[in-house]
Image (spheres, rainbow, N blue to C red):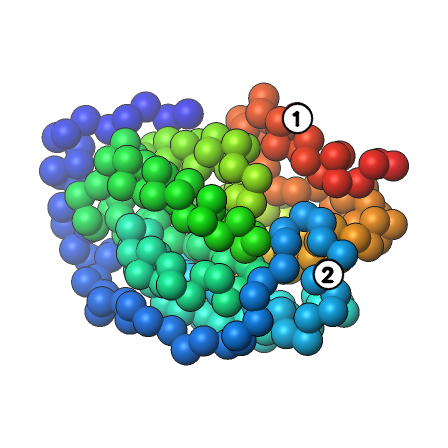
Amino acid sequence: RSRRPTTSSVSSAATIRSSQFPMPAPAAPSLTTLSSDSPGSSIPSSSVSARSMRGVLFLTDSVLKHTPESFLSNVSGSRLRCTKRINYRLTEVFNYESEFANFNYVIIACGVNDLARYDHTPLSLAESVISRLKVTCATHQTTVFLYCSILETKHTWLNGWIGEFNWAMFKVAAKVPNLFFFDAHDALERDHISDPNNNQTIYRPGDDVHITDAARKVVTNELVLGISLLVNLELQRVDKARAQFMSWNWPLRPSFFKRRNCFMKEFHDAIPSL
C-alpha cells in the first residue's frame, strides 16, 4: 500500500483537481421503477428462476460513463435488464436507495471524484460510506451489491489514497454476505492492454484519469463474467458456475491475496463439489 500523501502534497494538487475533475452536475435523486416484483434471494435461491424480469442498477461516474446499458446482454439465460445512472460522487449513491429493492444487482463504480475533488481522504470517505453501506446491504438482503474498485490514475498522490480506500472496501466486502468487491484495477493489469510492449494505451490522450474505450471494454467484459457467475450461483446452475469459477479467477490484485481465501470461501460454500 502506498503511503498517505502529506497535507502539503494535497494542497499542491489543487490545480490538478480543477483541471482533471470538472465540477459535475448533481445526480438525480430518483429513478423510474422497473418492476413491482419483490426481489429474489441472492446466493442461492430456487424461486428466482420464475421471475420474468431481472434488473441491474449500474451507478457509475465519468470513468465508465460511456458503457452502454446493453453491456450485460451477454449474461446468458438471465434476461438481465441494465439501468445506468451517472453518479459522480460515491457519497451520493444512497440517493438511489429507495430503488435498490427493485433490482437484483446494484453495481457501484464511483469514488475517484470524492477523493480528488471533494476534499475527502480515504479515512473520511470510508467513514461517510462504509457504515451506511453496511446498513443498506442489511436492509436489502435480497439485492446483491457489487463495488467496482476505483481505478488508478497518473497521479501518484491520488493513487495512494485510492489504494487505501479500495483496501477498506475490500475488507468490508469480505464480511458482508451480499456485497462483493470487484477489482477493476486487476482486471486491467492482467489484460494484454497493460503489456508495455502493447501499442494500446490505458488513458485517453492528454487525460490522466479517464481510460480509453478499449480499457473500458476490458473492465466491463470482466464485469459481465462476474455478474454471470453470481447469476448462475443464484439460479443454482451449479455445474455452469463451477466451470466459470475454475476457468476464470475473480479479479483481485496480488497485494490483496492475503485475504483471498476469506473472499473466495463463499464461492466454495455455494458450489459444494468445487
The quadrant where residue 73 appears: bottom right
Residue in view at x 14 percent, y 50 percent: 15
Above or below, 266 relative to 257 = below
* Foreground residue among 8 and 86: 86
Q: Secondary structure at mark 2?
A: loop
Q: In the displayed structure, does residue 255 sit left or right of residue 121? A: right
Instruction: Identify the residue at horizontal 58%, vertical 21% (top origin).
Output: 258
Q: Position of residue 90 (x, y in %)?
A: 33, 52
> Whole-percent x and y of residue 199?
57, 56
Q: Position of residue 116 (x, y in %)?
A: 25, 47
Residue on which disc 1 sits: 261
Marking on residue 47: 2
11 sits to left or right of 166: left
Give the residue type at disc 1.
Answer: Asn
Image spot of residue 157 (x, y percent):
28, 35
Disc 2 to disc 1: CB gap under 8 Å: no
Position of 142 with respect to 123 (left or right) is right
Q: Nearer the viewer, residue 201 or 263?
A: 263
Q: Quadrant of the N terminus?
A: top left
Relative depth, front residue between 143 and 36: 36
